[in-house]
Image (cartoon, rainbow, N blue to C red):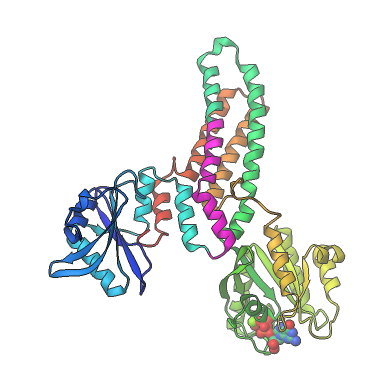
Amino acid sequence: MVNETVAAVSTAYGRGGIAVIRISGEKAISVAEKMFSTLGGKLLRQTPDRTAVYGDIVGENGVIDDGIAVIYRAPRSYTGEDTVEISCHGGILLTEKVLSRVFECGASPAAPGEFTQRAFVNGKLDLSKAEAVIGLIDAESEQQLKLNGSHARGIMKRCIDGYCREITSLISSVYVCIDYPDEDLEDVSRDEMLVALRTLSERMCSTLSTYREGKAVNEGIDTVILGKPNAGKSSLLNRLLGEERAIVTDIAGTTRDTVEEKMTLGRIILNLCDTAGIRETEDKIEQIGVRRALEKAERAELILGVFDGSRRLDREDEELIEALSSLVCRGKSVIAVINKSDTTSALIGEEVGRRLFGDADKSSEDGRIISVSALTGEGTEALKQAVESLFIKGEIDYNTVAVLANARQHNSMKMALDAVNRAITALENGFGTDVCGMDLEQALAYLGEIDGRSVTEAITEDIFHRFCVGK
Ligand SMILES: Nc1nc2c(ncn2[C@@H]2O[C@H](COP(=O)(O)OP(=O)(O)OP(=O)(O)O)[C@@H](O)[C@H]2O)c(=O)[nH]1
Ligand SMILES: [Mg+2]
């Protein structure tokens, strides 16, 4: 792959003022030279590095367009290879013509994310920075921009570097003991190592815990709206989204299948799912809907349990309370939403709070019970704040704290921490430092997956395939 010279349009597809075509690889300058004739008549290769030069884009049958070319010579380019960027007028047909001309002159089409993949292969950026580039392109909230910006500037790389340096120095002290057994170094270094490993483990543990916020900001929280028919689940979904996404009627059993939408809620993202009303029914389609709703709730992180606050609790609500209690027991975040606050209230909030969380007053204080009206919007701000504060505690400065940004990074950090903790247990159980050397090497390998220093090709392929063409 790396030997070929590739090209793609790096700006968005469609009408626009300008489009940028990027060419990267060994032959980038000679390819561009064949189709770009500078105004002054100089060869493109004679223009200085990183300097804009005006000229004509020339096809076999004459001038296609006029534009600007900039050469970035290796290794001082995004990809680390010779790169030429040609800006021409925007527009679908014109851009396609210029790109076809680039291909005629010897470049091949770049795959999605290929420029960034080449940058990674050439050591221009590590994997956490590459992922941050996707995050910046896909960002839907200010907070997501901030988080990915900090990764793009290297906060995660520096954090991983720090951990790796510490572990490497511990590993070398282990090998010193193995290599020089007569020096009687072991007892001292074992105690020292235990102290060092315990503080390391604590710090890694705190990095691991940042993922609760990182996931909420960058990936979104899988959230399911659960409740009996007609409680107002679809109305709540529509109210939160600010659009009439799901059908709302006064017929119980309106929603049959799940309705899913991604939404930005303040600083976090919710992957929101409206479901069929939970009830016993003879209707086959509705039965499937109910089963799907419960399955979705099993896999979700946050469940909004909706109750119709205008009526006394009935058997269907009792069943919902039971289902929600069991989800709470399994560590899911549950918020009870008492809907229809615009009507005469049946005062069910207290009972729901007591049955679900044990303490009604406390649960409404800490935002686990929220009274809303999906019809008028009353209470939805409080609900949004309650949801946000479940995942964002206080203000983390992303420029000083490395926040894990995705499941892949979280998983590798967890595996690394487990390995460090195994080393601690081994030492606590009286084993020698030589035993924990292997665990520490494993920790190092898992940490290396985060910034890409030890990562399989399958993982990198997977990451770069999530990019768009031209990046
Ligand atoms: N007064 C009042 N009516 C509401 C409110 N929310 C929903 N409703 C009404 O309650 C009825 C049911 O609303 P939906 O949103 O369809 O309820 P659902 O829970 O999605 O119902 P299913 O899809 O059948 O399970 C509709 O007539 C809504 O207009 C509310 O806050 N106040
Ligand atoms: Mg519905």
Residue 390: % across, % down: 70, 60
Q: Image point 66% across, 81% down: which residue?
A: 235
Q: Does residue 245 lie above or below 75 as drawn?
A: below
Residue 243: % across, % down: 60, 81
Residue 98: % across, % down: 24, 66
Taking the image as four quarters, which one is ligand 2 found in?
Answer: bottom right
- In depth, the one of 229 and 139 nearer the eye is 139
Seen as rendered, the residue at the extreme left is 61
Seen as rendered, the residue at the extreme bottom is 250
Q: Quadrant of residue 424?
A: top right
Q: Does residue 190 lie above or below 375 as drawn?
A: above
Q: Is residue 55 magenta?
A: no
Q: Quadrant of residue 301?
A: bottom right
Q: Image point 72% across, 83% down: which residue?
A: 376
- In depth, the one of 55 and 430 nearer the eye is 55
Seen in the image, is 242 located left or right of residue 52? Answer: right
Q: Which residues are magenta?
A: 140-167
Residue 389: % across, % down: 71, 60
Q: Does residue 183 lie above or below 436 as drawn?
A: above
- Please tell me whether the stretch drawn in magenta is mainly helix, strand or loop: helix
Residue 324 visible, this orientation: yes
Q: Quadrant of residue 304?
A: bottom right
Residue 281 visible, this orientation: no
